[in-house]
Image: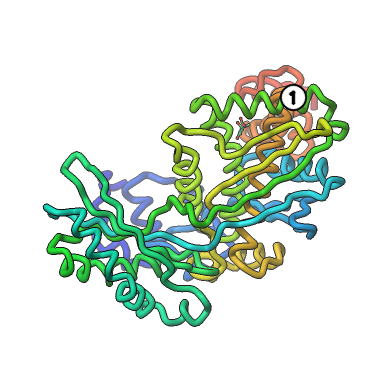
Amino acid sequence: MRNRTSRLSGFYKLGRDERLAEVQAVSGLDEAGVEALKNSSALPFELLDRLVENAIGGFTVPVGIATNMIVDGRDVLIPMATEESSVIAAVGNTARQCRDTGGFTTSISGTEMIAQIQMVKLTDPWAARAKILEKKAEIADICNGCDPLLVKLGGGFRDLEVRIVDGQTGPMVVVHIIVDTKDAMGANAVNTMAEKLAPNLAAWTGGKHHLRILSNLADRRVARARAVWRAADIGGAEVVEGIVLAADFADSDPYRAATHNKGIMNGVSALTLATGNDTRAIEAGAHAFAARTGRYRSLSRYEITAGGDLAGSIEIPMALGLVGGATKVHPTAQACLKILGVGSAAELSRIAAAVGLAQNFGALKALATVGIQQGHMTLHAQNVAIAVGAAGDEIAEVARRLAETHTVRQDVAEQILAEIRGRK
Ligand code: MEV
């Protein structure tokens, strides 16, 4: 092992084996680790290397199918990429329980993205704002000129907003260009437009342009979903009331809202990843949207219908694309999109909102009744059993006995495994 250093000059120029040898030399990684990385992906290394810099391997996350979903009258198979057990099963179970009421009904506010241009060093921000608003037609031309293909596809510049934001360094003028990016997530399109436009803004106002970047608070791309669960199908009036109380807790308390919304994102992010979309963009948008009133709140709502059933609904920004980035080049993402059978990014986004609601209902129902551990523990126990070296039939037995003890811990699993092996 060489001295541990992270200064690996020219690393990017090396081939995969050479990179692994370098990493091994400075990190002390053993042969088994090197082999694990070499065999870590079924994708050709050239593709991995094209997707990210300095690639040394892949990281396989399971993809599973959530069954039973009906979205806007259509049966849809939901591919979900996640490392967390219970997530996929929960969506399927939840969706089954609202099939009789028609499943999920969805809509979306649009497919518009916002790019921001920060203007600084302006002594007269309000006058600058007025000057920029006067140039709307010219701004539209500059933006559309950056992406004639998008315009041809029916997208392009839609609107202009100019805000005065009071920062600690003084007021700044923040220009929003609003662009319909159609089936693209749109980051590249709007970032290019913002960079092109910025010098013009500086020339018109006498200020200085600074940052030029999209906003992940995609509040012009809000997907909505709703569903009704009949009281009789989910355990009665007590369960309905229990879920409403749980939802009220989340909407009233940020500590609970964070976990509640994390549960929603278990489903949304798994579908996002399966389709090769940017999970961090979706997460950032969701959490910022949840805090849009100035207090971090729940993304979903639950009410009791006139007939005593449970009506759930969700609103969540959903900047998902069908074209561009990993979505287009990753064969698994392409396969997942085929499974979904979606014709547009808007349709994908609406399905994602439905998945978020399904996931959320599943978590709340468990939490409001038996608790989350019962379902989680069986699957978690299997993972712990595998982690301590159980193989074949041993896995199920170790997992069962672990779950029975209600202490799903590695040391307990080791003891059980030793006992089983001692018996043989
Ligand atoms: C776990 O990944 C997600 C939950 O914590 C969500 C929730 O509490 O609503 C179960």
Residue at the (78%, 29%) spot, across then down: 397
Residue 404 seen in the figure: yes
Q: Is residue 280 above or below residue 187?
A: above
Horizontal relation, residue 225 to residue 146: left or right: right
- Mark 1: give few (<14), some (14-19) or many (20+) Cα within 10 Å: some
Quadrant in the rendering for residue 341:
bottom right
Q: Secondary structure at mark 1?
A: helix
**Amino acid beneath label 1:** Glu
Frontmost residue, 405 versus 224: 224
Quadrant in the rendering for residue 421:
top right
Residue at the (77%, 28%) spot, across then down: 240
Frontmost residue, 294 versus 1: 294
Horizontal relation, residue 241 to residue 279: left or right: right
Frontmost residue, 42 versus 363: 363
Q: Is residue 27 above or below residue 324?
A: above
Q: Is residue 366 above or below residue 343?
A: above
Residue at the (24%, 61%) spot, across then down: 130
Residue 17 seen in the figure: no
Q: Position of residue 338 (x, y in %)?
A: 69, 68
Frontmost residue, 329 versus 318: 318
* Disc 1: which residue: 241
Quadrant location of the C terminus in the rendered image: top right
Q: Position of residue 57 (x, y in %)?
A: 48, 58
Residue at the (30%, 59%) spot, across then down: 175
Quadrant in the rendering for residue 288:
top left
Q: Position of residue 22 (x, y in %)?
A: 34, 56
Q: Indicate the colouring scheme.
A: rainbow
Quadrant of ligand 1: it is: top right
